[in-house]
Amino acid sequence: MAEASNVTAPTQFIETKLEKYAYRRFGTGSGLPLLCLQHFTGTLDNWDPAVTDPLASGREVILFESAGLGRSTGEVPNSIPGMAAHALAFVDALGLTHLDILGYSLGGMVAQQIALERPSLIRKMLLVGTAPEGGEDIMHMEKPELKKIADDPNLPGLKRLVKLFFTASASSQAGGEAFILRLAQRKQDREPISGPNVAKAQIAAFRAWEAFTGERFAKLRKITQPCLVANGVFDNMIPVRNSYMLSEHLPNAMLITYPDAGHGSLFQFHDSFVRQASIFLGSDKIWPA
Amino acid sequence: MAEASNVTAPTQFIETKLEKYAYRRFGTGSGLPLLCLQHFTGTLDNWDPAVTDPLASGREVILFESAGLGRSTGEVPNSIPGMAAHALAFVDALGLTHLDILGYSLGGMVAQQIALERPSLIRKMLLVGTAPEGGEDIMHMEKPELKKIADDPNLPGLKRLVKLFFTASASSQAGGEAFILRLAQRKQDREPISGPNVAKAQIAAFRAWEAFTGERFAKLRKITQPCLVANGVFDNMIPVRNSYMLSEHLPNAMLITYPDAGHGSLFQFHDSFVRQASIFLGSDKIWPA
């Protein structure tokens, strides 16, 4: 186990002008801190140590628990801007003024919103399994193929993630089983699991994010930071065409897609993803690494 | 200048059962030989040393001049299978039985055809700026935005490539100017430039490649080699959606796209492309690197 690890890092708490947030902060190195923004219903305990720990060998990794999740106080906002306000209150309370962001799924939308509201905060962004404002088919858990998994009483806890985040192939499912074993390595100081109110508010935020006014994707042109967009080609929670939209409309985005992978491509292909993220974050060049 | 370089490598010739082909072969290392298959109307002189030379530091790079191009004898076939037959005659004459392929544009289509006809020959493939059989909008030089460039009398020789292969942005055009300066570094032992008959036959091959019978993209499932698919998001000669089709239907393909880049993304972002290609080709893992 790595010295700096999401398996062992203590959960910390910070009071801010908005709420008291739980977070974890580990790792060291010459890189800027990497703020990690989490997926639908996920808590600090849903960050895969196979992704966070190697990245923490070159920089501080900071995992943020937004309002109403885990042991953070407050209510889950029903909009992406509402979530961005919590993330900004958090980084302000920590005194951080310049950082990189890994935004995964819901967290990638919050990252884009932060980039629009406070561009000077962000140097580079990793946007994984996510969608632009005005994206399509974002987390429609009522779709038959997702509803079947979500409602299956024989898929308790983390087993559900293996079906939701990975494809049906034997190798992808094996990757999913390895993923949940890694998540289960953390034995204490864990966060409470999200309840139905969390999902309800976050789904409302997804529905609002699908809408847009004016020219579609025009806001993406204002996000000039180098971005690395990544996804699995068979993501059925936030389909890969949303990643195409991002990489075609963000002015400085490189796209990577993984074969035989779903929403959890960064966990399935963690070696490749960490290598790519390290090259991207480690480069002094503006673009491309 | 690198010791093994397309600027200085002598053009060689080999007699085969079909034709006499011109080729260049340079570099050394522990990797499998890398067979490079060229783009629409391109000759051996159109391979950018910024791409070929660093790759030649880890393996032999073999540039192939197909029938009817440069100093190779014969006629340009009007179909991709016809071109694949020449490539196979060439590798057989060299006695090569296992190699990697870099197929760029037209060359990427020939690479796919070879993989279908003789799968045992190929370990891994780089498919850049190309399209599957049944792809869309492949090299329609009659489109206004392409015809305007192709017919411009004030764009002689390589200047035309700067407009065709790069976007209109200042930084992409600067990348294009640097590209043609690199191509011009080779001063002697150059190949004759392709005439209109070459273009006519290759365009006929593109039209045939756009057609398909039976289930669209079904053949891609048979190409099980690890593939790295790459393109620029603003390629207007073979639009990037053809790369999406490849990465979604090839069972083992990773996709990389580059921002503000056109058909010549590998030349514009040669540092990144060479790094990605080296990681991909250098890995012992089946997949993913």
Image: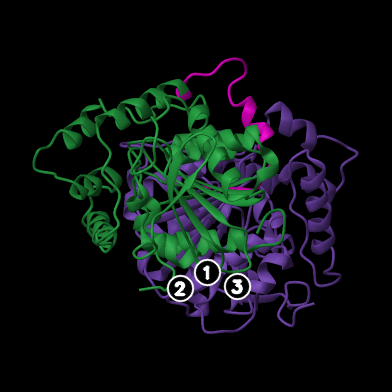
Chain colours: A green, B purple
Residue B196 placement, left or right of A73: right
Q: Chain of mark 3?
A: B
Q: Chain of mark 2?
A: B
Going from N to C along the chain, the mark reached first, 3 or 2, is 3
Residue B199 placement, left or right of B102: right
Tell me the quadrant of the picture where the C terminus of chain B can be found.
bottom left
Instruction: Tell me the SS state at disc 1.
Output: helix
CA–CA distance in space, label 1 to label 3: 19 Å
The reply to whether callout 1 and callout 2 are in contact (CB within 8 Å) is yes
What residue is rendered at 54% in x and 62% in y? A60
**Which disc is residue B283 wearing?**
2
Q: Position of residue A270 (x, y in %)?
A: 40, 61
Task: Provide the residue span drawn in magenta.
Answer: A209-229
User: What residue did someone put label 3 on?
Assistant: B62
Q: Position of residue B117 (x, y in %)?
A: 37, 59
Under mark 1, the amino acid is Ile
Q: Position of residue A210 (x, y in %)?
A: 46, 23
A59, A211: nearer the viewer: A59
User: What residue did someone put label 1 on?
Assistant: B279
User: Dot 2: few (<14), some (14–19), or many (≥20) neighbours within 10 Å?
Assistant: few
What residue is rendered at 45% in x and 35% in y? A241
Under mark 3, the amino acid is Ile
